[in-house]
Image: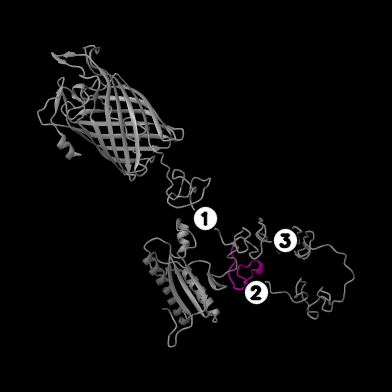
Amino acid sequence: MLAIAASLARPAGAASSGFAVNGLDPAERGSRWFALESLDMRGRMRPAVGVTLDYELRPLAIHDANGDVRAAVIDHVLTTHTGGSLVLFERVRLGLDVPVILYTTGDRGTLRGVTYDPPRHEQAMGDVRLGADFRLVGRADSPLTVGLGAQLFVPTGDASSYAGDGAVRVAPRALVAGTVGSLVYAAKLGVMIRSPQDSTFADSPIGHQLTYGASGGIAVIDKRATIGPEIFGSTVLTAATFKTRTSPLEVLLGGHYACECGFRGGLGVGTGLTSGYGAPDLRVVGSLEWSPTVVLDEDGDGILDADDACRSTRGVASSDPLTNGCPPPPRAPDEDGDGIPNSEDACMDAQGPGTTDRRTNGCPDKDGDGIADPLDACPFEAGPPSEDAKKNGCPEKVVPPPPPDHDHDGVPDDEDQCPDVPGRIASDLTNGCPAIDLDRDKDEIPNELDACPDDAGPADPEPARNGCPNAFLKGTQIRLLDQPQWKPGKPELAASAANEEIMLAIRKVVADHPDLAMIRIEGHTDNQGKLAWNRELSLNRARVMMKWLVDHGANRSKLRAVGLGPDQPIMPNTTADGRKANGRMELHVEQPAPAPVGSAPGNP
């Protein structure tokens, strides 16, 4: 712009009969204000076009000592500003404004012996304005958006009609805007550089200027309507800074409304607050513009960014604004598929309804008598409740004379599978035989309440951990109640009593099951950091665990360490709990692949 300004500047010493008087420099198209910028730079190659109609009453007049108007050098002015803007890449905006005076009148006046002519032409061209603005930080409707820009005024205006300087003007500026709830605001600060050198009008300097402005208001009707005042002005950068004549200041109260069809209309009225050059007694402004509506959905999940709490991650709709548009939390394991997670299900292998009793939660009632099977002494026969646990849920029957019962265990000989040995009543092939061991692992926790009935462990209020040791074999996996703790970002076990208990528990499982052919020690991480680093860290941690087990007596030929890094997450990495769960160790039992002749077992 500075290069263009230099090429278009008129020769020094050329005279002009007037200067650009109008103090309203319209905002670029797409703003919710008349003179201030809202910095809405959403979209890519997004255009905006429109026209502003501006009426001024006596922007330039000669007053007597009492302040009354002696002569209105410029009396009435009606100006149109036709222009457009183009937003590039959601950060850069180019603008164009073409002012045309449709009608202007005035009277010749004399001040201190000098005569001042009114506008020479009723219609005139103003200085065409080219602009470029760059958004530094913030986005549309954020609490703070900051931008820098510059404007170039091409000398197309008629100076004799007070529509232009007859020379190039350049105006760099800084811009801020923001939205806080229903409150909106904007401000600007810039410099108007005039060319060539400073001149005077009525003994007052007309030269380089400091320009400024601010606005504030409320956004209503889903933020489509904006109502509020704007104040803007300027002052010359000379010894006459902030003197009355050289410092026009105006206030404008207006409103804008943008419909969903893309059109925006505005109407405002204002007046000059000082008698500076260009500050009118009355200003009325109207505008009409169009710009395509921008609807943003960054992650494409159908929830607009304005309502999406996770804008960059696809999610689901929610009535909670803090989770709307975020992925749903992972479902807890539920082996029988009855909607009750294993950790709360008293009957994990059979579907049942939820109850408030931890003994029957998720358990069926096969005979339909209203007593869940774990508490029903006759689960296959409907019966009434009873305080006697042996009769609870059993039908009331007339007891005939007892049949022969050789072992006196209450089971008739013709039904007793063990007629010579006292036993217990059962509905299967163990009827009349000695009772099944109700606490197989002898940890004083009944099998029916023991989450690990074959592995002794301490009592725990959480059903899924009750009676389980720190490590135990389940299926083809050595399950860990708690994960060993590592030094942050290192393949080193943290020195703690808890870590020692966990590792000794793993070593006990390995020692108690010498028949396990091969144990694969897997290291896993979350997705924070580089992929290669995570995989190396997970492998080294697996090797450290394998070395600990070998150092404590495990057979190295039956151990294998692998590092899977972030490749197999069990929870989303979008939360701290999810990342903690993904940074884990797992031990799996596997059959080793047949080794080639001459090969040796061990870790690759």
Asked which secondary structure carries label 1, the reply is: loop
Q: How is the image coloured?
A: one colour
Q: CA distance from mark 3 to mark 1?
A: 31 Å
Residue tagged by mark 2? 440
Which one is nearer the viewer's eye here, 94 or 135? 94
Quick check: 55 above or below 358?
above
Outermost right residue: 401
Other residues around mark 1 within 10 Å, as few (<14) / some (14–19) / many (≥20): few
Other residues around mark 3 within 10 Å, as few (<14) / some (14–19) / many (≥20): many
| Circle nearer the N terminus (3, 1) | 1
Quarter of the image that includes the C terminus = bottom left
Give the residue at x 74% y 59%. 371
Residue 363 appears in which quarter of the rendering? bottom right
Asked which secondary structure carries label 2, the reply is: loop
Residue tagged by mark 3? 365
| Residue range corresponding to the magenta coloring | 442-461
Q: CA distance from mark 2 to mark 1?
A: 37 Å
Outermost bottom residue: 598
Q: Is residue 446 visible?
A: no
Quick check: 351 above or below 18?
below
* Residue 329: image tag: 1
Q: Is residue 149 left or right of residue 424?
A: left
Please, what is the three-letter code of the amino acid marked with disc 1? Answer: Pro
Q: Is residue 496 left or right of residue 169?
A: right
Q: CA distance from mark 3 to mark 2?
A: 26 Å
Please, what is the three-letter code of the amino acid marked with disc 3? Answer: Asp
Give the residue at x 43% y 79%. 603
Asked which secondary structure carries label 3, the reply is: loop
Say which of marks 3 and 2 sits in front. 3
Please, what is the three-letter code of the amino acid marked with disc 2? Answer: Arg
Say which of marks 2 and 1 sits in front. 1
